[in-house]
Image (spheres, grey):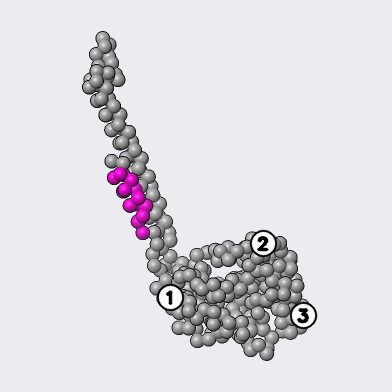
Amino acid sequence: MKFSIKYYAYALMALPTTMAWEETCRPFPEIYASGTELCQKLFSDSFLVVDDTEPGYTMWFFDTDKNPNDQVTLDIFGEQPPEECGLQYFHKDEPTPEDDGMKECQPWKQRSCCNSSIVASMEKLKESYGEEYHWDRCGPMTPACERFFVYESCFYECEPSAGLFRKYNDSQSHLEEFNTWQMHKMPIKKSFCDSWFDACKTDLFCGDGDFFSCAARYQANNPEDEIKKERDTNEKLAISLVVIGSVAFVFCLFSFFLVHRERTGKPVFVGEGGNAVA
């Protein structure tokens, strides 16, 4: 009896809990013709690729004491980088120094619009926006390719100048599509986008290539809620079977004990006059 109950419990717990959703996965070169198309399509119209001879931002740099994007802002707008973080999602109100938790986004440690708690690790970056924005839903990425998604996440979260390219300003709050997090045609250096494309040539991504539409489609077709309900039901049923089986097993043992005592002339329950209770 113990074996059968245990077997059924494990069988129920092992019922399928995952479902293939992303059926449009394709290699990067089949989605994007070039690094330029990758940067301009991946996040809708958030970025505009410009030749390296023109003022353009970079999503990554190594000199933590001098952000090269500050000079780009000066070249484009004729003024120093903003003292406010224009984007509003996880962003701070104004750029300030951060602590040693900026391991993934170290270049922005001295002046950052992000909180170190949000960018503490690659997993934290990936999880912050929800499962629909996981960049590796089509399978594990090569480290080189995944690194560029981390670069972009750090750039979006931490770069003070990113807020200068917010798609909607506060005066447009009456628009149905209004939000405070989306960017619009921020100029990005072509060399950076080409390097991103080269790093991901063997990797897979959502077929239409637009992160936002991929996320929206995932939300519309996300089986997670149903899967969770099914998993919870299976777990409860498994626990019930285990409890019932345990009670039945104890009852059988006790019955065997009573019969054994009865047959050996030592009944457990004895009535008045020394007679065993039937």
Residue picked out by circle 1? 25
Which amino acid is tagged 2? Answer: Gly
Tag 1 secondary structure: loop
Tag 3 secondary structure: loop
- Residue at 35% across, 56% down: 15
**Comparing marks 3 and 2, which lies closer to the viewer?**
2
**Comparing marks 2 and 1, which lies closer to the viewer?**
2
Residue picked out by circle 2? 101
10 Å crowding of disc 1: few (<14), some (14-19), many (20+): some
**Residue 44 versus residue 9: which sits nearer the camera?**
9
Which amino acid is tagged 1? Answer: Cys
Mark positioned earlier in the residue sequence (1 or 3)? 1
* Residue 11 part of the magenta segment: yes
Q: Which segment did they paint magenta?
A: 3-16
- Residue at 43% across, 65% down: 222
Q: Are the two marked residues, 2 and 1, in contact with CB atoms closer than 8 angstroms?
A: no
Q: Is residue 152 above or below residue 10?
A: below
10 Å crowding of disc 2: few (<14), some (14-19), many (20+): some
Mark positioned earlier in the residue sequence (3 or 2)? 3
Residue picked out by circle 3? 79
